[in-house]
């Protein structure tokens, strides 16, 4: 009997692209879908398996795409739905899949659903949102109160985030039906799946807290829908929870999310004991047959080279080696592969209400200049063109690590087994024939590994010793 076919994300590398900052095709200073399509050769060269696009839907941009005004179209700054179709087709030709960013917990206050909902207490869409005669005491994530009084409607509506992001009422069956149709619309256009925003807070009942049983019910419904396609579609959740048992619950019994982001890993720092503990506990609590997903940066947090690596490329390489050799799916945020740092944004150029612009600045290509970019271009790291030409660059190392991962069965699907080591050394085995060891200290360390070095962050081939801030992958003998 042939072994079961593995999903494409098993051992895969996802690339998170922030479209407004990735590549600009028309010189208006804003990245777009045509620009991204024009850089597919780079992503194919890098070796990624899929691209997660930050929000592409029309939006007033009060929260930069996370306030959706139409779930079935494309923001005009980024192009047209035909541009998105062309991108899906082009990536499919080179074996790369596209994931869209789905924002189901709330809409824009300019979405037709909310405009209808607020128009009258008798509106059929009134129950699609959370309305009350009185406001409860609750703060929003972005500051201020989580309830806003709407004068025409004569009631308060709930918003966990900005007042311009009214929360949908997921206890309403019509809302669930509407999103079923949204998922089908994009799945049938060739989208390989969704990253689902704030999935841990999707259903609010009562409004001040999440209703986990109902969230799991929605996820099981979506998983059945996603599994009905061939190949199955991927549901990747923004599970922003710090308890690993809670994270594991979003996988259900292999009938909810296929992947849930691991924020304890992202925030563990570059500490061997902390990272080893998070990974070991994650492997223990996930349901049998489930895959973890790992990331170091995203659009909401300070970039990892600045946040945990002191902008030191030796440390950046160690972090990337860990990210790309763990079991499961790895996610690179655009620029991670360059060691791209956080950018300081002058006060007169700030757009984001929550201060996240510095992690969203334009990609440094080097072979083309951004013209009047929407955010400042950082000059704190070498460009793609410079790093591609340098075999010793962070980019060249990252590409080598991705190629090694994709070409070695142990690194695609082999089990994760912790290995004992001295303090500050994080070591593990993948499968039966591959080991990874990383020295996260300022002192050299001895290793008890026998075999051939397949990859070193410092270009060395000694499996018995690690320099400070050096990591190796070893083919065991």
Image (tube, rainbow, N blue to C red):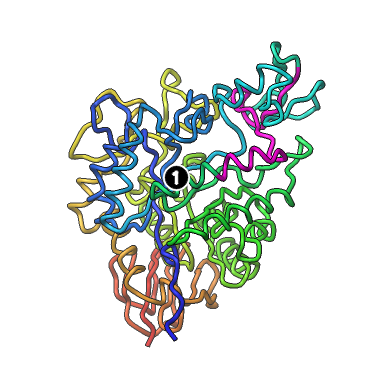
Measured along the vertical axis of the image, is residue 335 above or below residue 315? above
Percent position of residue 264, x then y: 60, 54
* Residue depicted at x 38% and y 79%: 464
Q: Nearer the viewer, residue 106 or 322?
A: 106
Is residue 168 highlighted in magenta?
yes
Residue 430 is left or right of residue 85, and the answer is right
Q: Nearer the viewer, residue 352 or 57?
A: 57
Measured along the vertical axis of the image, is residue 103 above or below residue 418? above
Label 1 element class: helix
Percent position of residue 242, x then y: 65, 52
* Residue depicted at x 54% and y 63%: 292
Measured along the vertical axis of the image, is residue 429 above or below residue 141? below
Measured along the vertical axis of the image, is residue 374 above or below residue 427? above
The quarter in which the C terminus is drawn is bottom left
The quarter in which the N terminus is drawn is bottom left
Residue annotated with mark 1? 186
Rendered image quadrant of residue 268: bottom right
Q: Residues within 10 Å of mark 1 (few under 14, many from 20)?
A: some
Percent position of residue 422, x then y: 53, 73
Q: Nearer the viewer, residue 256 or 178?
A: 178
Is residue 123 highlighted in magenta?
no
* Residue depicted at x 82% and y 21%: 134
Percent position of residue 378, x then y: 33, 34
Q: Nearer the viewer, residue 397 or 232?
A: 232
* Residue depicted at x 48% and y 54%: 295
Query: Which range is magenta?
Result: 155-180
């Amino acid at each position: 009997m042939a072994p079961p076919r593995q999903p494409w994300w098993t051992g895969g590398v996802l690339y998170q692209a922030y479209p407004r900052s990735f590549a600009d095709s028309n010189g208006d200073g804003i990245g777009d879908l045509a620009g991204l399509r024009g850089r597919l050769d780079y992503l194919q060269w890098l070796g990624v398996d899929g691209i997660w696009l930050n929000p592409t839907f029309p939006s007033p941009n009060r929260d930069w795409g996370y306030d959706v005004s139409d779930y079935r179209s494309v923001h005009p700054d980024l192009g047209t739905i035909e541009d998105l179709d062309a991108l899906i087709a082009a990536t499919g030709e080179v074996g790369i899949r596209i994931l869209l960013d789905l924002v189901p917990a709330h809409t824009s206050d300019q979405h037709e659903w909310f405009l209808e909902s607020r128009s009258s207490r008798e509106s059929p869409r009134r129950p699609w949102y959370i309305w009350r005669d009185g406001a409860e005491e609750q703060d929003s994530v972005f500051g201020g109160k989580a309830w806003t009084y709407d004068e025409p409607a004569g009631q308060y509506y709930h918003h966990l985030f900005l007042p311009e992001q009214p929360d949908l009422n997921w206890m309403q069956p019509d809302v669930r039906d509407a999103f079923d149709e949204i998922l089908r619309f994009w799945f049938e256009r060739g989208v390989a799946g969704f990253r689902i925003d704030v999935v841990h807070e999707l259903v609010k009942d009562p409004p001040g807290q999440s209703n986990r049983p109902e969230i799991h019910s929605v996820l099981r419904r979506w998983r059945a829908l996603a599994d009905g396609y061939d190949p199955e579609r991927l549901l990747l959740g923004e599970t922003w929870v710090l308890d690993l048992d809670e994270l594991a619950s979003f996988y259900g019994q292999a009938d909810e999310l296929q992947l849930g982001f691991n924020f304890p890993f992202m925030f563990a720092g570059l500490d061997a004991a902390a990272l080893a503990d998070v990974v070991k506990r994650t492997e223990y609590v996930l349901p049998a047959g489930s895959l973890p997903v790992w990331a170091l940066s995203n659009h909401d947090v300070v970039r990892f080279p600045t946040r945990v690596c002191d902008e030191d490329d030796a440390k950046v390489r160690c972090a990337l080696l860990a990210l790309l050799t763990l079991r499961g799916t790895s996610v690179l945020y655009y620029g991670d592969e360059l060691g791209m740092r956080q950018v300081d944004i002058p006060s007169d150029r700030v757009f984001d209400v929550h201060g996240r612009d510095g992690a969203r600045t334009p990609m440094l290509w080097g072979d083309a200049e951004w013209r009047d970019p929407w955010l400042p271009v950082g000059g704190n790291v070498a460009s793609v063109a410079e790093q591609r030409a340098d075999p010793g660059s962070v980019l060249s190392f990252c590409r080598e690590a991705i190629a090694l991962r994709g070409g070695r069965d142990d690194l695609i699907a082999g089990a994760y087994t912790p290995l004992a080591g001295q303090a500050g050394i994080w070591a593990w085995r993948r499968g039966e024939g591959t080991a990874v060891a990383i020295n996260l200290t300022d002192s050299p360390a001895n290793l008890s590994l026998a075999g051939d070095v397949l990859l070193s962050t410092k270009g060395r081939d000694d499996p018995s010793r690690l320099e400070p801030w050096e990591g190796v992958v070893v083919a065991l003998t």
